[in-house]
Image: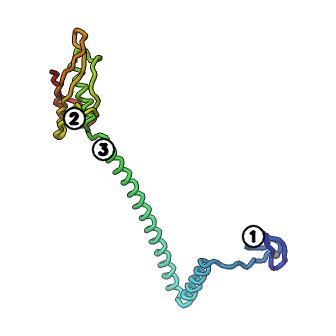
Amino acid sequence: MEKCPFCKEKIQNGAVVCKYCKKDIPREKTKYELAQEKAKEKEDQYLATLSEDDKKKYLHHQKLKLMAFGIIVFAVVIIIFAWAISGCEELLTTSSSSSSKVDSVDAYSCAKEKVLEALKSPSSADFPSVFSGDIKFNQSGDSWAVDSYVDAQNSFGASLRSTFSCNLTIPDRDSCSGHCTIY
Ligand SMILES: [Zn+2]
């Protein structure tokens, strides 16, 4: 709370008008307010020197300037917005293309799929881990050659190790075609 300099009643901090005596409370003006006042004063002085027609022209000109400023701000906002959206799209396309890039793990699962199709008892098949170093990969574009081995039971129930060699075409992660030869 502070005191009104005129009637000494208690008034709200920062009040512009005293609610008791209704007088304006003098406030220190901010730099911005002072600058604006000065500019307005200058403009008024300038306007006073103009004829009625010139005054209208000047005011119209000021209005156009304000509109142009508004349009520029609007354009900048639109450009930033468009830029942000295109950035997001780019991010999406790069992430989707990198996720569809075929690597040796994909080639190996494709090879295993084809080997299982060729096995007599695929449920017993036991493949080495893709990280074991027992698998040879050879890539040329979409073509993959995958060589490894599989432990599987034969028709007599005995577990046998067979080597296999696959020639596969894998244009993307969801596509797997080709054939495997089991020795
Ligand atoms: Zn007062």
Q: Which mark is residue 90?
A: none
Q: Quadrant of residue 143?
A: top left
Q: In the image, which is nearer the foreground, mark 1 or mark 3? A: 3
Local SS, label 1: loop
Q: Going from the N terminus, do you reach mark 1 or mark 3 first?
A: 1
- Distance CA(mark 1)–CA(mark 3): 62 Å
> Where's residue 154, x and y in %?
22, 13
Residue type (three-letter) at the residue carrying disc 1: Asn
Measuring from the top left, give residue 33's x and y in whole percent: 61, 78
CB-based contact (under 8 Å), mark 2 and mark 3: no
x and y, in percent, of residue 11 in the image = 80, 70
Observer-nearest of 8 and 69: 8
User: Is 117 in front, or is 162?
Assistant: 162
Left or right for 171, reference 57: left
Query: Which residue matches tag 3?
Result: 98
Q: Quadrant of residue 2?
A: bottom right
Task: Name the foreground residue: 141 vs 26.
Answer: 141
Ligand 1, seen in the image, is in the quarter at bottom right
**Which color mode does the image show?**
rainbow
Q: Which mark is residue 170?
A: 2
Q: Which amino acid, by three-letter code, is at mark 3?
A: Ser
Q: From the viewer's perspective, is 101 left or right of 180?
A: right
Cα gap from disc 2 to disc 3, whole angstroms: 15 Å
* Residue matched to label 1: 13
**Figure check: 162 above or below 129:** above
Q: Is residue 83 above or below residue 2?
A: above
Q: Please give the name of the residue rendered at 78% of the width and 77% of the height, measured from the top-left corner.
A: 23
Query: Quarter-wise, where is residue 74 in the image?
Result: bottom left
